[in-house]
Amino acid sequence: MVKLKGKALFNASTCLAAIGFLLFGYDQGVMSGILPNKHFIDLMQAPSSAMIGFTVAIYELGCMAGALMTGRLSDMVGRRNTIRIGCVILIIGAVIQTATQNLVMTIVSRVITGVGNGMNTATIPVYQSEISPPKSRGAHVCFECALLVVGVGIAYWLEYGLHFVGGEVAWRFPLAFQNFFALVLIAGTFVLPETPRWLVSHDRDDEAKEVLARLWTDGDITHPRCISEYEEIKEGVDFERRENISSYKDLFTKGKFNNRKRVLLGMLSQMIQQLGGINVTTYYLTDVMLQAGMDYSTAMLMAGIDSIVYFIGALVPIFIVERVGRRKIMLWGLLFQAITLACVGGCQKANSDYGTSAAGNGAVAFTMLYNFMFGASWLGMAWLYPAEIFSTALRAKGNSLSTASNWLGNFIVAMIAPVLFEYITFWTYILFAGLNLFFIPMVYLWFPETKGLSLEQIEMLFAIDEVKNDMQSIRSDRVHHNYDNEKKNDVEDIGQRDNEPYVAHKEEVSTKNL
């Protein structure tokens, strides 16, 4: 098998993560066009709005269970094997879901599918963050989140096209199509290596050096860049071992690294994303269009158009996250999400009172604008931030908990949304607009900036002064990564730099940045 190196390897790892999140997005969007399908509703024996909400939301509980299973499993068998296991479970659930004959079978199959998807969504950001360089880690994770929107769009457009076919195929084929992405994802894990941080944490140092050499130095394990990367990772892992930091219990103790604060920030970031109202317009987007006075065919078409707007928004942070930083994107996102949701609610109110087409069209326009703003902010930030802030020993476990909180929030919104639409109508949007404003001071006061720092440097952001001084003394004889002076073409310029003194990353991370 050909071993990828340098940019090719970075790009391949990003593609693997992107496919995983494309599958995630497809699963998120696929029920939007199935729920209003008359054949599906008749087969399910016309369930109530509360039961529809439960059928949609039970998937989130399966995802939460899968995410919680992932922490210990990923540390035991590795990031790649965990993704493979998650895909196999997802495929089993998707097959049963496609063949469903009643509501109970649908519910059970959605739980199984959710477990597999929960494992993937908890593991893929960890894999991506442990492979990507500090200067582009944020852009890589944001790219995979943009592919999440592509998955949503594929689901919408596929169901729009199959709507004209009619019959069982209009909703069974979209459910079966999940398996295609899962199979591609499994195949990708056999092309890419395990992460060097996981390998070092399991004393497979030679393999870790080989992966680092492939990533940074065209396979040369004696190159100073490879040695520097390895030593930084090794020192971080050894320090965690001396402090005996590795269990779930350690996540909820303050200790020398403020682990409790980090896990709470990771879980809060994911909960903020979900309680910001995105699933009101993802799972029930077609219903939102119907409420605006559109017929079913037009509503399906507009859902597909919305996915394009959503995707354009999701592209924005790829280009600005490493310039602007995480915090500013989070804060501005919350503000504009609140404004657009309030406008949707106002238009829905005017539409219900006066029945004007302008009000209905306004509701659709502001819904699209909300999705654009969400795509440009919290879509990527909620997945990027937790993947960055945990130490190597706790990253899989911490990310599993933060991802589980995402799915818990997902479940809450998916469960209550149809009931809210039925009983408080347009106030649903005002409620979520208020929640966005409520979260702004939390982000401003509690979330430190992580832009441009290596994972080991981010570890020091949360450490007490004693630990910072200890690590500074250990690293005093070495160079460190620094965002501002990191070379853009490490792999490409090796030939030119082999006969020059090693100059990359000379600035030591100062304590004021920690």
Image (tube, grey):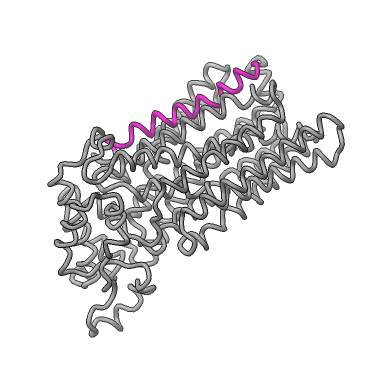
**Do we see residue 366 in this rendering?**
yes
The foreground one among 445 and 315 is 445
Q: Residue drawn at (38%, 71%), measured in percent from left and top?
A: 484
Q: Reply above or below: 44 against 366.
A: above
Is residue 49 left or right of 67 when viewed as pictured?
right
Give coordinates of residue 356: x percent, y percent: 87, 36
Give coordinates of residue 444: x percent, y percent: 47, 48
The foreground one among 433 and 191 is 433
Q: Reply above or below: 415 against 434.
A: above
Is residue 226 left or right of 159 when viewed as pictured?
left
Q: Residue drawn at (46%, 33%), measured in percent from left and top?
A: 407
The foreground one among 47 and 472 is 472
The foreground one among 512 and 172 is 512
Q: Which residues are magenta?
A: 47-73
Q: Quadrant of residue 48?
A: top right
Q: Residue drawn at (32%, 53%), measured in percent from left and top?
A: 130
Q: Residue drawn at (51%, 28%), measured in percent from left and top?
A: 411
Q: Reply above or below: 188 against 211.
A: above
Q: How many marks?
A: 0
Q: Is residue 63 magenta?
A: yes
Give coordinates of residue 60: x percent, y percent: 48, 29
Quarter of the image with the N terminus in it: bottom left
Is residue 245 left or right of 132 when viewed as pictured?
left
Give coordinates of residue 462: x percent, y percent: 29, 49
**Do we see residue 1 in this rendering?**
no
Quarter of the image with the C terminus in it: bottom left
Q: Is residue 152 magenta?
A: no
Q: Main SS type for the magenta part?
A: helix
